Image: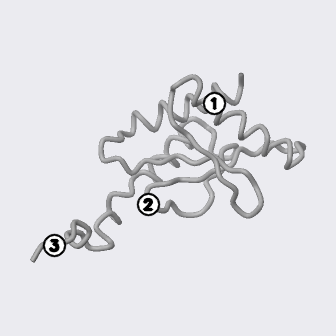
Amino acid sequence: MRRDARSRHRPDDHAERDPDEHEVRRVLERRGLVDELRPLGEAQLGIVSFRREAPGVAAADLDARHLEVVARMLADGDAAVSSTVLHGFTVLRMCTINPRTTPADIDRTVAALGRAWGA
């Protein structure tokens, strides 16, 4: 009988390989951005969602700015950051589940996000 590839792994096999979310938080803290780029909830399947905070800026304007940042990141080719809508707000998403993703990759992506946001 042929085993399904999915059956080789227990559902929680990747639970300990979720340094991704914690590493993203550490990078944000180290760069002093944890209050600006606020992670939202727990990472799921290696996807960390976060939203840039900008007091005094209308939510719709912030949503549009998040989409501009995603487009700029993709155009620059620095990293593949995507967006989605959570709780009615556009948020950024970073997927770190690739086993070759390193803390340095996450740091470079966060730095690129900062550049894209500031451009």
Question: Which residue does the numbered mark 3 point to in the structure image?
Answer: 3
Tag 2 near tag 3, CB within 8 Å: no
Question: Which residue does the numbered mark 2 point to in the structure image?
Answer: 45
Q: Earlier in the sequence, mark 3 or mark 1?
A: 3
Is 76 in front, or is 99? 76
Residue at the location (63% across, 50% down)?
Answer: 50
Position of 103 with respect to 116 (left or right) is left
Query: Which label is found at residue 27?
Result: none
Tag 1 near tag 2, CB within 8 Å: no
Residue at the location (56% across, 43% down)?
Answer: 29
Above or below 15: residue 24: above
Residue at the location (21% across, 70% down)?
Answer: 4
Cα distance in 3D space between marks 1 and 2: 24 Å
Q: Quadrant of the C terminus?
A: top right
Residue 5 in the image: state x and y as whole percent.
Answer: 22, 66
Residue at the front extreme, as displayed = 1
Above or below 75: residue 27: below
Of circles 1 and 2, the one toward us is 2
Q: Amino acid at mark 1?
A: Gly
Cα distance in 3D space between marks 2 and 3: 23 Å
Q: Residues within 10 Å of mark 1 (few under 14, many from 20)?
A: some
Q: Residues within 10 Å of mark 3 (few under 14, many from 20)?
A: few
Residue 48 in the image: state x and y as whole percent.
Answer: 53, 53
Residue at the location (50% across, 32% down)?
Answer: 79
Q: Quadrant of the N terminus?
A: bottom left
Residue 101 in the image: state x and y as whole percent.
Answer: 36, 41
Query: Helix, strand, or loop for circle 1?
Result: helix
Above or below 83: residue 3: below
Question: Which residue does the numbered mark 1 point to in the structure image?
Answer: 114
Of circles 2 and 3, the one toward us is 3
Q: Amino acid at mark 3?
A: Arg
